[in-house]
Image (cartoon, grey):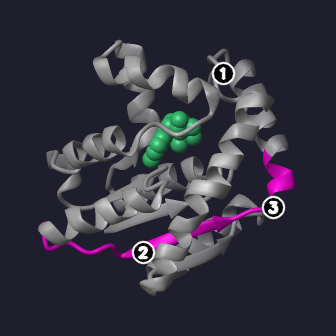
Amino acid sequence: MRLILLGPPGAGKGTQSTRLMTEHKIPQLSTGDMLRAAVKAGSPIGLKAKSVMDSGALVSDDIVVGIVAERIEEADAKGGFILDGFPRTVAQAQALDAMLEGKHLKLDAVIELKVDEAALMARIKQRADETLKAGGAVRADDNPESFQIRLVAYRQQTAPVSAHYAALGELRPVDGMAPIDQVSAAIDKILK
Ligand code: AMP
């Protein structure tokens, strides 16, 4: 199964991908996680991406498309994957379309978690508080200033990605404001 989860930061993409990954035994390909790993490893990509990520802006399409192209070639992704946080621009969506077409592969669903923007800041604060309580490190971009920039990037650059998939008849919206169990049930219904 090949899925894309779309939605603004804090919409619950990570929570749903983790669950779907276990249930369908396919990897979650989170470009945010891959970039954070590159930053941690101090790789050339990580060095380029760090300040952009900390600010809340988007890393360049070339970098992100390159890491996804490599990742979907890995053995564990051959049977399917969940893309979380990618594509985030129409150019990335077009690059993904071309990548899949080249391999004669199709997406099974593009699921968009629809959420009320006013609730997102509270969710991000909750995520940071829970991480701190669990003794973890809070993401450098989970602060009000970077979060605002992430939301603007979402509105300006990522919202058009939904229109791209809607035009292809592939977009499946889900109410992301519902309790987690209900969001999960709505997604499972689409995937049946
Ligand atoms: P995320 O964990 O998905 O919230 O991503 C964290 C940050 O990584 C984003 O704010 C961007 O700076 C960068 N990033 C992740 N995925 C992408 C992408 N598909 N395109 C551009 N930048 C990305």
Q: Which quarter of the rendered picture does the N terminus lie within?
A: bottom left
Dot 1 and dot 2 residues touching (CB under 8 Å): no
Q: Residue at x 61, y 72 (%)?
A: 185
Dot 3 and dot 2 residues touching (CB under 8 Å): no
Check mark 3 vs ligand 1: CB closer than 8 Å? yes or no: no
Against 20, residue 70 (above or below) is above
- Amino acid type, residue under disc 2 in the picture: Ala
Q: Which residues are magenta?
A: 103-120
Check mark 2 vs ligand 1: CB closer than 8 Å? yes or no: no
Locate residue 103 relative to residue 79 in the image: left or right.
Answer: left
Comparing 103 with 28, the one in front is 103
Name the secondary structure under disc 1.
Answer: loop
Q: Residue at x 38, y 34 (%)?
A: 34
Locate residue 87 relative to residue 175 in the image: left or right.
Answer: left
Nearer the observer, disc 1 or disc 3? Answer: 3
Comparing 91 with 76, the one in front is 91
Residue 134 on image: x %, y %: 68, 21
Residue that carries the numbered disc 2 in the rendered image: 109
Name the secondary structure under disc 2.
Answer: strand
Q: Residue 26's quadrant in the figure?
A: bottom left
Q: Which quarter of the rendered picture does the C terminus lie within?
A: bottom left
Q: Residues within 10 Å of mark 3 (few under 14, many from 20)?
A: few
Q: Is residue 115 magenta?
A: yes
Residue 188 on image: x %, y %: 52, 74
Residue that carries the numbered disc 1 in the rendered image: 138
Locate residue 66 relative to residue 36 in the image: left or right.
Answer: left
- Amino acid type, residue under disc 1 in the picture: Val
